[in-house]
Image (cartoon, rainbow, N blue to C red):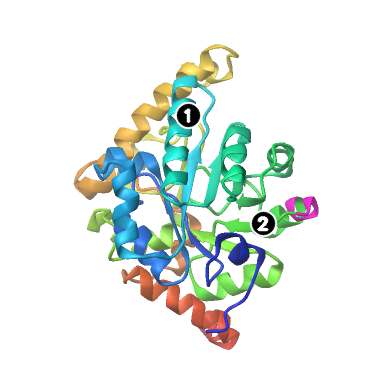
């Protein structure tokens, strides 16, 4: 396997510059292990591990280790609305370090505490960024690279094209990983050729056999196209990319007047975000596990265009690896 060596493959110790993005509620241990074992990087999402898949975090990581000895990553959400939640996340980071994880992806908030702890253990931290401003702030706190979340991503997406976002962030001189819009081999190769150090995919791996999401969710992804992706404020108060359904049409996609005002208030916004976070944790879990019979939301990005079937996660990784070794394969896939 020739593949391609990039700063991401060196930083994470992986064979292929491909990350299975951490997803609430879809990051279960079997999916993480399958992606890493195939040569990519599976990433632990602690809230999913503990509250959705019902594993103690330490034991969940050990469960993954029993299925693969290859590197895995860890996702630390640093929402600043609660010191208690930040402290809990730091304890989870410490457990991951104790269990040998050395590649971390942070999001929101100030990554300094995580960076200091991870660097002390010889690890690496990349940080989610939707524009240059947030990337610059993270760089000031010592992160080693960026996950560039563009406007085609699922969940909380950005608003730039992959090309524009790369041009903004790459001059900072750290590795940049593309997150959003990549669902097939041709797009994967194209982003690497553009200069990205790697690609992070989420939607593509929800439609995998190892993912424990409901079959209705997986089939919704297979059946959707980019034009079916809309952004709703109903989940968290800020736009979240989801698949348009009759339920979404019925309830609308805009937050109410009061919620918008509270989100703009300097004091109230943290409480409102906490409320939305707790509510969205419940809603997304129910939709993922109970399927279309439960009227809620299916998160997905515009990469649905490249997802044509549900298949083993390892087969997805291997096919993308083959495309990178032989770019003509990716070119024929887009013909």
Mark 1 residue crowding within 10 angstroms, few (<14) / some (14–19) / many (20+): many
Whether residue 141 is situated above or below residue 103 in the rendered picture: above
Which segment did they paint magenta? Answer: 169-173
For the question of whether residue 280 can be seen, the reply is yes
Residue 237 shows which numbered tag?
Answer: 1
Residue at image point 59% right, 31% down: 109
| Picture coordinates of residue 2, whole percent (x, y) | 57, 83
| Picture coordinates of residue 166, whole percent (x, y) | 71, 56
Which residue position holds label 2?
A: 176
Residue at image point 33% right, 42% down: 57
Q: Measure how far apart labels 1 and 2 are at the Cα level.
A: 28 Å
**Who comes first in sequence, dot 1 or dot 2?**
2
Mark 2 residue crowding within 10 angstroms, few (<14) / some (14–19) / many (20+): many
Residue 188 shows which numbered tag?
Answer: none
- Majority secondary structure of the magenta segment? helix
| Picture coordinates of residue 17, whole percent (x, y) | 56, 67
Whether residue 155 is situated above or below residue 161 in the rendered picture: above
Say which of marks 1 and 2 sits in front.
2
Q: Magenta stretch containing residue 170, yes or no?
A: yes
Whether residue 133 is situated above or below residue 318 in the rendered picture: above
| Picture coordinates of residue 219, whole percent (x, y) | 29, 61
Determine whether the residue tagged by mark 1 lies in a helix, strand or loop: loop
**Residue 142's image quarter?**
top right
Side of 60 where 133 appears, left or right: right
Side of 242 where 14 appears, left or right: right
Q: Are marks 1 and 2 in contact (CB under 8 Å)?
A: no
Determine whether the residue tagged by mark 2 lies in a helix, strand or loop: strand
């Amino acid at each position: 396997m020739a593949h391609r060596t990039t700063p991401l493959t060196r930083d994470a110790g992986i064979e292929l510059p491909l990350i299975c993005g951490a997803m609430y509620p879809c990051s279960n241990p079997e999916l993480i292990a399958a992606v890493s074992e195939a040569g990519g990087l599976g990433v632990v999402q602690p809230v999913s591990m503990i509250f959705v898949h019902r594993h103690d975090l330490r034991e969940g990581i050990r469960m993954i280790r029993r299925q693969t000895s290859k590197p895995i990553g860890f996702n630390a959400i640093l929402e600043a609305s609660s010191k208690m939640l930040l402290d809990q996340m730091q304890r989870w980071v410490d457990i991951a370090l104790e269990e040998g994880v050395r590649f971390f992806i942070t999001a929101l908030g100030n990554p300094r505490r995580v960076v200091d702890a991870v660097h002390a253990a010889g690890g690496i931290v990349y940080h989610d960024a939707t524009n240059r401003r947030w990337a610059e702030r993270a760089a000031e706190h010592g992160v080693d690279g960026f996950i560039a979340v563009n406007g085609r991503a699922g969940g909380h997406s950005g608003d730039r094209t992959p090309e524009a976002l790369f041009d903004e962030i790459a001059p900072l001189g750290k590795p940049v990983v593309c997150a959003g819009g990549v669902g097939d081999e041709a797009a994967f190769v194209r982003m690497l050729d553009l200069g990205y150090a790697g690609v992070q995919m989420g939607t593509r791996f929800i439609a995998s056999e190892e993912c424990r999401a409901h079959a209705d969710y997986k089939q919704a992804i297979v059946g959707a196209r980019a034009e079916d992706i809309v952004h709703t404020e109903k989940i968290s108060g800020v736009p979240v990319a989801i698949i348009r359904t009759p339920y979404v049409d019925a309830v609308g996609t805009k937050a109410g007047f009061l919620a918008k005002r509270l989100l703009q208030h300097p004091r109230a916004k943290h409480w409102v975000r906490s409320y939305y976070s707790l509510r969205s944790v419940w809603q997304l879990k129910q939709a993922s596990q109970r399927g279309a019979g439960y009227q809620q939301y299916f998160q997905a990005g515009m990469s649905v265009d490249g997802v044509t079937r549900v298949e083993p996660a390892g087969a997805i990784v291997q096919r993308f690896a083959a495309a990178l070794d032989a770019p003509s394969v990716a070119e024929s896939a887009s013909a």
